[in-house]
Amino acid sequence: MRALDSGRLLAVLAACIVTVVVAACGGSGSDATSSDSTSKTPLAVVKPVVDCSKLASTDITDIGGAGSTISSATVTAATVNGASVNFCTVKGTLAPSNTFEVALPVDSWTQRFAELGCGGLCGNLSDPTKQSSFSFSYTCPLVQQGGFVTAATDMGHSGQDATWSSDPQKQADFAYRGQHITTLAAKKLIKAYYGQEQKYSYFVGCSDGGREALMAAQRYPSDYNGIVAGAPAAHFQIQNSLYHGWNVESNSTTGTSAGKAVLYADKAQVLHKAVVAACGGQAGVADGLIADPRTCHFDPATIQCAASASSTSNCLTAAEVDTAKKLYSGPTDAATGMLMLGGSPLYGSEANWIGVEVPTSNSTDAPVPVSSIFSYMIVTGAYNLIFTGSPTMPNIDTFGYHDASFYPNYLQTNHALNDATSPDLSAFKNAGGKLILWHGWADQQISPLFTIRYYQAVKDTMGEASANEFSRLYLVPGVGHCGGGEGFPNIDLVSQITGWVEQSAAPNAVMTYQTDATTNKVTASRPVYPYPAVAKFSGNGDWHDGANWSQGAPLYNDPAPAWAGSAFYTTYSPKTQGVAAP
């Protein structure tokens, strides 16, 4: 791709994003004493009123309980956007074992706080001073200038040994408590360090961090003014059992976790190339991206190798075709034919399957067991979290892939503990909260169809007009799980959420970018619009240039098909256990 000339890029920015960036993330850069123009009442940079070391004596037992301690409070330097920024870095533990870290800017705090989500099954503590931890803030000046206090937690356990997931307290800390008490501790440290509370609080997370984001909106509606939830694993019980389990069984020579893989990396690429040729791009745009994969009706059998083929390197064998079809379609209930899952990997995501649904090796290499792929590992790591308290402990080979009773009999037990799919967000809305959901259409780990179903459930529960007052969903073509892929993965949603919260500037068009891997120079740009609208090329000018795109009508209007787990997306009361969060 060619780079956009600076004039056209500036026009794109001016038209679609800079108004919000300046308003929501602004600041003068080097002048640490200046105020930004974010709010109707500008927020001045606030300096500390005590030495950083004093925070080491802050009592946090009122938040985490007996045994909660701060282990250190020291000034550290971090490189943010190429500049050195000083932080008062506070580390500690909230009982029984929630390790946390809070980074408080020494010279650049703009009275904002952001809790950062933790991905996977967590078990690690991210560095909150790293800009990479602050996802979806591409070019946001406020983030680049160290304007936020940020906090992170390991959510109550370290590593992924089998013991933590069977501990009721650690289950609760992972499910919902860890992020909440870390937020309370961070806010207490803010008050002690700066002599005042934050003006605005935010949560930014993706994958399980997206689940944590929605968990906060549902359980603790006053914790945050604004939330950005990317590719949320909100359907934790389903995602880490039936969804990933089906991917394993579908790609197995035996149909069980004891088999070898059928579909490998090279053949996933062959499949992807064929899908893109059939469904990718639009008139005048040779990018291969699928604007809405639900409009694609590709049949893998069309690239099945002929029986007489001497080489199968550019086609799929009958077994590979069968695996691809199973991955796309998902399992069905044997009695009714109803879908067991609310979503499956979508057309256009095939290249991203590598390492998740299929091995990283090729079909010409030695066969590998399906137990070596990510889908298998995430399922087996989540057994205790999902099934503790169930009548029996099923395994990946005994999940009820074709039996809808698996939901009430096995997944219901901890649904209200681990899942964040309750669609009644009225308390969050009434507290003034704003929510931005986003998902990559080519996500290889969590189907965007689940996020669409949740968003629709919110609208059905609260009314579309009410939901539109505080929530948005963005779907980004060609983008994989929490980023990456062939699409436009660079996006600044932090500007959008701060602008919405602080200026009542409801987001519409959000510009996304592709950049050169070596120079980081922008090579193409394109807007995305609130779901279900899509970006449409004008037909004039360079399609690489986002200024030549506008809002188009939805491409898909069919109602989502019924599925066995739909009751999990209705309103429910959350389950608590162990030490209660304050």
Image (tube, grey):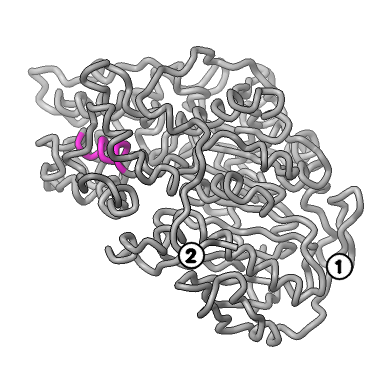
Residue nearer the viewer, 430 or 580: 580
Residue 79: x and y, percent?
Answer: 64, 70
Q: Sort mark 2 into few (<14), some (14-19) or many (20+) by Cα contacts within 10 Å.
A: some
Residue at image mark 2: 579
Instruction: Determine contact: label 2, label 1, CB under 8 Å.
Output: no
Inspect the magenta stretch and tell me whether residue 244 lies in it: yes
Q: Which residue is mark 1?
A: 31
Residue in front for this viewpoint, 469 or 251: 469
Residue type beneath disc 2: Val
Residue 162, relative to residue 218: is it above or below?
A: below
Q: Which residue corresponds to the image point at 60% horizontal and 57% vertical from the top-left? A: 134
Magenta highlight range? 241-249
Quadrant location of the C terminus in the rendered image:
bottom right
Query: What's the magenta bit mostly, secondary-structure-wise?
Result: helix
Q: Height in image: 176 above or below 362?
A: below
Image coordinates of residue 112 in percent, x first then y, are 75, 60
Q: Quadrant of the N terminus?
A: top right
Tell me the quarter of the picture where residue 20 sits: top right
Left or right: 298, with 380 as reference point: right
